[in-house]
Structures are given as C-alpha cells and as structure tokens.
Image: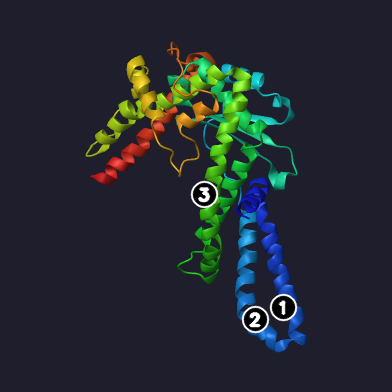
Amino acid sequence: MRRVVLMVILRFGRYAILPVVALACAMVLVWLMAIDRYTILALAAAPVVLSAAPAAIALGLGLLLVPSRRDRNPKLDEAAAPGLWLIWRELDRAFTRSGRTLLIDADFNASIREESRYAGLFKQHVTMTVGLPLLIILDQRAIRAVIAHEVAHARLQHASGGTNLFDFIAASENVLYYADPDRTITGRIAHALLHSLLQWLEEEYRALSRENELCADADAAKQVGRDEMARALVLAEAGSVRLAELVFAPLEKELIGAVKAPTPPFQRIFNQLGDIRAPGPLAAAAVAGLEREEDPKSTHPPLRRRLANLGFADIPPVDEVQASAVDQVLAREAVRELTKRFDDEWRKTADAWVRVDR
C-alpha cells in the first residue's frame, strides 16, 4: 500500500491530494443530504464532518495553490558552458523533445529534475544542476560519466518522480507554516494527517532512490563504458572526502571564535587543488569509502554496492586526474563570475554568523 501511495505522489506530485479533496467534498455532500432523513445520525456525525472535511479541503486547496519555488542558482547558456551542453546533447537522445536548463550550484554533486505544470498536462522541462566543485576537482572524463548518470535518471523516469515528491512535501510543509499546529485546529488536523504520511513516505522514497541510483549507474555504463562509470564513482567518492578534510573541516574550525570571515571555500579549493587530488591520499579516501557501511537515511547506496552493481568486487585501477573539467567545459569568464558569486554569498553568510557569535 505504501508503494502504491508513493507511486501516485511520484506521478502527480501535489496534485495527488485531489482524491482526498474529492472525498472530503463528498463527505460534506452526503452529510447535508442526510440531515433531513437521518437527523440524529447526522447530528452525531457533525463534529467529525464539520472539522475533518473543511480541514481536508483547506489542505488540498493549500497544496494546489502554493506557487512553485524558483531556483536561484545561476543559469548557464551554451556560450558560458559549451562543453557541458555538448556532452548533454551527445548523451541525451531526447534532448530536442523538451526544454532544457543548465544550472550551476556550489555543492559537490549533480542532479537532474523534470517539471511539468498542472499534473503533467503540459510539456516537460528538464533541469540539470552541476556543482562547481565537481567541475574543479574532477576531469572531463569523469564529468561525462556523471552527466550520463543524470541523463539515465531522466531516461528511466526517475527525475520527475523525485521532483513531484519534493514538491508535495514542500507544499505540505508550507500549509503547516500558514496553519500553525500549535495555534489552529486546522493546523492540528493537517499535522496529524501529514506527519505520519510524510515520515514513512520519505523512508519509502529513500529505499526507492537507492534502487534508482543503481539502475542509473548501469544504464550510464552502457553509454560511457563500465570502467569509466566506475572511475567516476571512485573519484567522486574520494574527492568529496578530501574536499571535506582539506577545505570544509578547517573552515568550520576557523569560523569558531573568528572576528571576521576567513578565506572563502572556492578560493581554498583552487589553492589546495593539488593536495585534494594527490594520488596517495585520494586512493586512501576511496578505500575508506569502500569500507563504509550503508546509511539507511541516505538516498545513495554505498560505494561498494555501486561498484558491485557494475561488476567490480574491489576498487578498479583509476587514472589520475590531470586537468580540471572546469577549464574545458566552462568559459573562463563564467568560471570567474561563478567563483566570485559563490564566495561572495558565502562571505555574506559568514559575516552575519560571525557578528551574531560575538
């Protein structure tokens, strides 16, 4: 039953609430019709009908009328990111069938989502987000495999489901923001209806997402080759560990008791790029990732399971990263603007945090 509900929400997003709204409306209609013929029974049912039905209707309308949130990450056209657009077009057989948007964010990650307005009645729009740290630390070969993995998610129809689920959850939480459970009866009823639903829904989705990751790895391997996909997984795992050790962990320590914002993240990444990609520590980080146990709260399976899914019992031989993909897939001006933008945004946040901490 859980998987059925999950599939409905993955398909329709916030519009999956419509059956609940219809049921609430039918409940009110039946109650009104029963007042004349079954007055005593109708009066006995009045507390339930007059509280649950309006709350369900209000909840449904709130979900349906919440506006979509726009992504504030910078968009890059083909002039700013010629290499990324070229790889995407090469790997995506459905490239011309719907609109495409390329975003760059500050995370060491990549993702893809499909959006279609009004329960899928209109043409889909595909948005791929690639993290700038990923482009700086990995090379073009690895980035090509990463994009193949994201394209596989879209081809296997994983992307639209995740977007719809997060849209449903965000809209639900937005309703609770306006109908405070601590102050309103409607909020209490909505919280009771949504809390347990969202909790097990997220658990079910995490399990499904881990399965989807393995399917996307296998599908991408058909495009770029099994060895290339495994190499990208190993480099991404090890790169994230080294990035945390050499950049973000020291940065967090420096922020404690700081009187002004320290050197921002991207300036540090470029300054320590050689150390991050040093072959010995990078290999050790990959081995540590291979020994890591599966996290039930993660949407991604561990490295060992992903490599085994590709047919590798251990870490395969991995060529060293010789050159950053960022120099090959983005225009130089775009790189300068993006690094400045992300560092400036981080510095503003850090300055505010330092002022509060004084």
Instruction: Indicate left or right for 45 with 26 as reference.
Output: left
- In the rendered image, which quarter contains the N terminus? bottom right
- Inspect the image, locate mark 1, and give the three-letter code of the amino acid beneath it: Trp
Q: Are marks 1 and 2 in contact (CB under 8 Å)?
A: yes
Q: CA distance from mark 2 to mark 3?
A: 35 Å
Q: Secondary structure at mark 3?
A: helix
| Mark 3, residue position | 203
| Mark 1, residue position | 31
**Residue depth check, mark 1 versus mark 3: number of the one nearer the observer:** 3
Q: Are marks 1 and 3 in contact (CB under 8 Å)?
A: no
Judge by depth and name the residue closer to the eye, 41 or 62: 41
> What residue lies at 52% left-to-right and 63% top-to-bottom?
191
Sequence-first disc among 1 and 3: 1
- Inspect the image, locate mark 3, and give the three-letter code of the amino acid beneath it: Glu
> What residue lies at 57% left-to-right and 44% top-to-bottom?
69
- Farthest top residue in view: 322
Asked whether the viewer can see residue 80, the reply is no
Q: Is residue 136 above or below residue 304?
A: above
Q: Secondary structure at mark 1?
A: helix
| Mark 2, residue position | 45
